[in-house]
Amino acid sequence: MPAITRRRRRGAATAAGLVAGVVIDQVAGDPRRGHPVAAFGTAAGRLEARMWRDDRTAGARYATLLVAAAAAPGLLPRRLPGRWLAAATALGTWAVLGSRSLTAEAEAVAAQLRRGDLPAAREQLIHLVGRRTDTLDEAEIARAVIESLAENTSDAVVAPLLWGAVTGLPGLLGYRAVNTLDAMVGHHSPRYENFGWASARADDIANYLPARLTAALTAAVARAAGGSGRGALATALADGHRHPSPNAGVAEAAFAGALGLRLGGRNDYGSQVEERPVLGGGGRAPRADDIARAARLSRAVTFAAAAACAAIAFARG
């Protein structure tokens, strides 16, 4: 078979697998037992216990080893017939995506707020954010949920799909490893300031283009949530760079502008308090019913990302 024909078939199979994986995730959600990302996290924790040093080089070796180990299985199906490559890509996409679980958690918080049960809403919110929730009022709970929806739509949906489209199954799996390591060791703390430096920088690089694609897709589909595409783009351009994260701020600002909301402010993480810059200063404070709008927007971005990334994969083939 000519090489160009093989490439085309691989591109078509990858495109089909990405779309199928998104559909499976929307229908079935995350695997209930034996989640591959959880298994990876367990292995990463055990390896950290052996490799930890208060040193950037040790952290870089740790991250490189784990990302390579996660990406390597993705090389195996490359020479399989197209339908098997599509099936492997669909399973890989389902394993690393988090769209349905993300919106389900957000809607569970919204349901508690509608019942007027603030303590239950605060408890449910723990599944979405790392900040303290025990003193938050309705507006602050809604803000936290919408910020998490925006950031994770970029990190857990658009980014893996884009890396899968550009580099195939190895990129899909490798990206998820990078993102997981950032969550585990990439934050500021005495233990991880040096050891987690490489993981944090790798995540920043891996999410740079996906975050901007998320903002563009948010603008494109904002009307699905009764929002404004112009507002999404304008706020992302005006405020996205003000956030401490070079990527999360772009996605959060796009959601704020699309929904006409004001995000950002004081976040208490227990060990430290951050005063985040305001995103969408012309908007209003979020309310409980805005969570449903943000969830609709997240789902719309998911479907748009699936279509866009499938087109990229097909074109590459």
Image: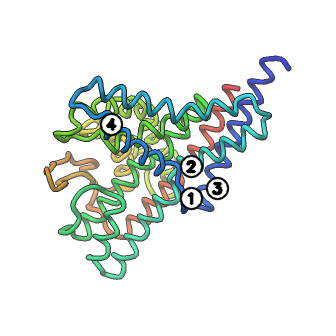
Image quadrant assignment for residue 161: top right
Dot placed on the residue nearer the N-terminal end, 4 or 1: 1
Image quadrant assignment for residue 155: top left
Q: Work out how far the residue at label 3 is from the one at label 2, CA to CA, in angstroms.
A: 10 Å
Determine the residue positioned at 24% across, 50% down. 281
Dot placed on the residue nearer the N-terminal end, 3 or 2: 3
Q: Work out how far the residue at label 2 is from the one at label 1, CA to CA, in angstroms.
A: 7 Å
Q: Residue furthest right?
A: 1
Residue 228's place in the image compared with 51, above or below, is below
Please, what is the three-letter code of the amino acid marked with disc 4?
Arg
Please, what is the three-letter code of the amino acid marked with disc 3?
Ile
Q: Work out how far the residue at label 3 is from the one at label 1, CA to CA, in angstroms.
A: 10 Å
Q: Secondary structure at mark 2?
A: helix
Residue on which disc 3 sits: 24
Please, what is the three-letter code of the amino acid marked with disc 1?
Pro
Residue on which disc 2 sits: 95
Residue in the foreground of this view, choosing between 42 and 187? 42
Residue on which disc 1 sits: 31
Q: Position of residue 303 (x, y in %)?
A: 58, 50
Q: Which mark is residue 50?
A: 4
Q: Nearer the viewer, mark 4 or mark 1?
A: 4
Dot placed on the residue nearer the N-terminal end, 2 or 4: 4
Q: Secondary structure at mark 4?
A: helix
Q: Position of residue 133 (x, y in %)?
A: 23, 65
Dot placed on the residue nearer the N-terminal end, 2 or 1: 1
Determine the residue positioned at 30% across, 81% down. 116
